[in-house]
Each structure stands twice: as C-alpha cells, then as structure tokens.
Image (tube, rainbow, N blue to C red):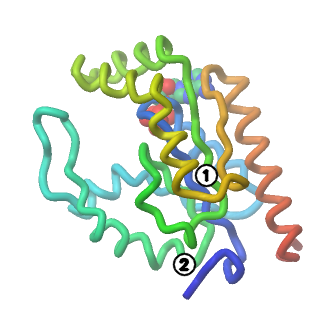
Amino acid sequence: MADGASRTSPNIVITGTPGTGKSTHAQLLANESPIPLRHINVGDLVKEKGLHDGFDEEWQSYSVDEDKLLDELEPLTAEGGIILDWHTCDAFPERWVDLVVVLRCDHTKLWDRLEKRGYPLKKIQENNEAEIMNVVIDEARSSYAEEIVVELQSEGMEDLEGNVARIVQWIQAWQNDRGTTG
Ligand SMILES: Nc1ncnc2c1ncn2[C@@H]1O[C@H](COP(=O)(O)OP(=O)(O)O)[C@@H](O)[C@H]1O
C-alpha cells in the first residue's frame, strides 16, 4: 500500500471555504513547483465523472458519492505529485496526504467574491458563516497530524505569491528529507 514513505512526490491538499482562493493557489503552485504536480479540482472531477447522486437545487451543489470519489482518486494519489483542491478535506485518508493547506479570508472579502461568482444568497450566507465558525480549519486539524496542517491568509496578491513561495520551499524540504532531489 502506497504511503508517504514510498512516494517520490508529495500529495498536497489545498482546502478552505469556497472563494478563499484554492483554485488560484493550486494553479500557481502547479506552475511554480520545482517538480511536476497535477492540479485536481475535485468539484470539477465529481461533475466530469458523475461521482455524485444528483444535483441539489436548493443548495446549488452536487451530492458527492464519496466512495466513488475515493475509488477514482486512489490510483492517482498512490503515484504522488497531486494537488487536491476541494472545500472539504476529511474524506481523504491520512495516508494519502503530506501537506494540508487551509486558506482563510476575511468574511466581508469572501462575501464579495461569492457574490461576484453569482451564488444564491443562501449559499453565500452558509459559506460566510462557515468561514467565521472555522469549519474547514477545525476539520483539517481533527483529521490530520498537527504538523502537516498549515493555515494561510488569502486576501491579496501578496498573500497568494507568498503562500505559493512557502509551499514551494516546503516541497524542496520534503524532497531533501527523502533524498529525492537531483
Ligand atoms: N489571495 C488572493 N488575492 C486576491 N484575489 C484572490 C485571492 N485568492 C482568490 N482570489 C480571487 O477570489 C476569487 C475566488 O478564488 P478561487 O481560487 O476560485 O477560490 P476557490 O477555489 O477557493 O473557490 C477569484 O476571483 C480569485 O481571483
């Protein structure tokens, strides 16, 4: 069974309330990483591969079939070098994951981002409240070892660039620790 010790590239989860900047971070990280990383937008994968039990009109979201999702992701994560971009993280087994980045954003900024995205008011309120109530960071801390969970602010471009530079440094250190560089 593949675990962190057998991977030559790390698997990185980028999580956070919708609108905190997961996809933006994941794309920049995939571009700037010293090793090839594949960005998987889990929400898009669920839609493309039909890994759900239908669309919930009230909440404007898919009811994800987690068993199907995990079966789809298992062989990909076994190889390593994956960025998992999703608004929740506790479904992913600990053995898959080397680093969990939880993005945070001031709730008024988040509200504006979600409004621009055209979300219905109910969905904006739900997500805004989740950010205020620390839902995703609490979930990450209760699902993974403390030392692999990193909480980062994502409010401006300087945050984005600094966060990605920090994750790149972490990747280099991860490789050095395992003697997989060069
Ligand atoms: N650190 C940041 N600085 C400025 N704008 C950001 C930042 N992070 C995200 N955004 C903007 O917020 C919006 C939502 O970002 P996105 O990456 O799609 O979020 P998520 O994947 O978490 O739903 C986008 O318009 C993006 O450009």
Q: Secondary structure at mark 1?
A: strand
The residue located at (46%, 63%) in the rendering is 92
Q: Which residue in the structure is indicated by mark 2?
A: 78
Q: Amino acid at mark 1?
A: Val
Q: Secondary structure at mark 2?
A: helix
Q: Indicate whether 112 appears above or below 158.
A: above
The residue located at (19%, 35%) in the rendering is 60
Q: Is residue 124 shown left or right of residue 177?
A: left
Q: Which of 29 and 178 lies nearest the eye of the viewer?
A: 178
Quarter of the picture holding the N terminus: bottom right
Q: Which residue in the structure is indicated by mark 1?
A: 100
Does the Cβ of the disc 1 residue fall within 8 Å of ligand 1? no
The answer to which of marks 2 and 1 sits earlier in the sequence is 2
Can you tell which quarter of the image residue 121 is in?
top left
Q: Amino acid at mark 2?
A: Ala
Tell me where residue 36 appears, x and y as whole percent. Answer: 67, 63
The residue located at (12%, 53%) in the rendering is 54
Q: Is residue 113 shown left or right of residue 175?
A: left
Tell me where residue 160 appears, x and y as whole percent. Answer: 67, 31
Residues marked 2 and 1 touching at CB (< 8 Å): no
Q: Indicate whether 46 appears above or below 153.
A: below
Marks 2/1: CA–CA distance = 17 Å
The residue located at (85%, 60%) in the rendering is 173
Q: Indicate whether 94 appears above or below 1.
A: above
Q: Indicate whether 162 appears above or below 1.
A: above
